[in-house]
Amino acid sequence: MKKNVVYLVLSILFSLSAAYADVLIVANKDVPENTLNQQEIREIFLGKRVQWSDNSRIRFATLAIPEIHSMFLEQYVKMSEADWKIFWKRMVFTGRGLPPEIMAAESEMIDFVKKTKGAVGYVSSEGMAKNPEKDAVKIIGVK
């Protein structure tokens, strides 16, 4: 009986993380880049890269959904949630940067990216597939 409960719990946890397994980088249609490498994505979300190749301003946002945000940080920024928070507190305290805007839902992220010139963010592949506005933003390829 205990074995069955353990298997059930593990399969539920695995299915929850699998639902958010793919994190997609999304950008406003006017963003000149179609692909970015992992280092460029890291620099953007750490506020170290502030302009696109056409010199337009980068506006980035993050999600308040812990599962997706953690996967994004792990996959692209190579930071834990704790390190991320410390990094942005230090940036704000020293006056070297403003923290990213935080979106409560994937639909809010897609709407922000769609309406904001130079915007970039991320969503889960599942959230993107479900969103009726998915064609209003472009998915950035990752090199």
Image (spheres, helix red, strand yellow):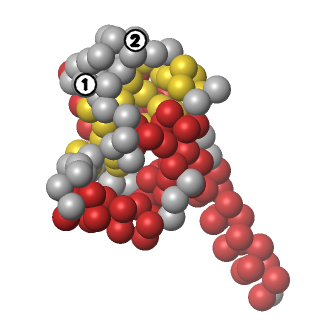
* SS at mark 2 in the image: loop
In this rendering, position of residue 64 left or right of residue 43: left
Q: Residue at x 44, y 53 (%)?
A: 69
In front: 126, or 21? Answer: 21
Q: Residue at x 25, y 24 (%)?
A: 57
Examine the rendered structure and indicate whether residue 100 appears above or below residue 12: above
Q: Residue at x 65, y 56 (%)?
A: 15
In this rendering, position of residue 15 left or right of residue 136: right
Q: CA distance from mark 1 to mark 2?
A: 11 Å
Q: Where residue 49 appears, x then y in whole percent?
A: 37, 34
Q: Is residue 35 visible?
A: yes
Examine the rendered structure and indicate whether residue 119 appears above or below residue 54: below
Q: Which residue is mark 2?
A: 32
Badge 1 crowding class, 10 Å Cα cut-off, few under 14, some 14 to 19, many 20 or more, is: some
Picture quadrant where residue 35 is located: top right
Q: Which residue is mark 1?
A: 57
What type is the residue that disc 2 sits on? Pro
In this rendering, position of residue 9 left or right of residue 84: right
In front: 48, or 113? Answer: 48
What type is the residue that disc 1 sits on? Arg
Q: Residue at x 27, y 58 (%)?
A: 91
Mark 1 and mark 2 lie on one chain; the one further toward the N terminus is: 2
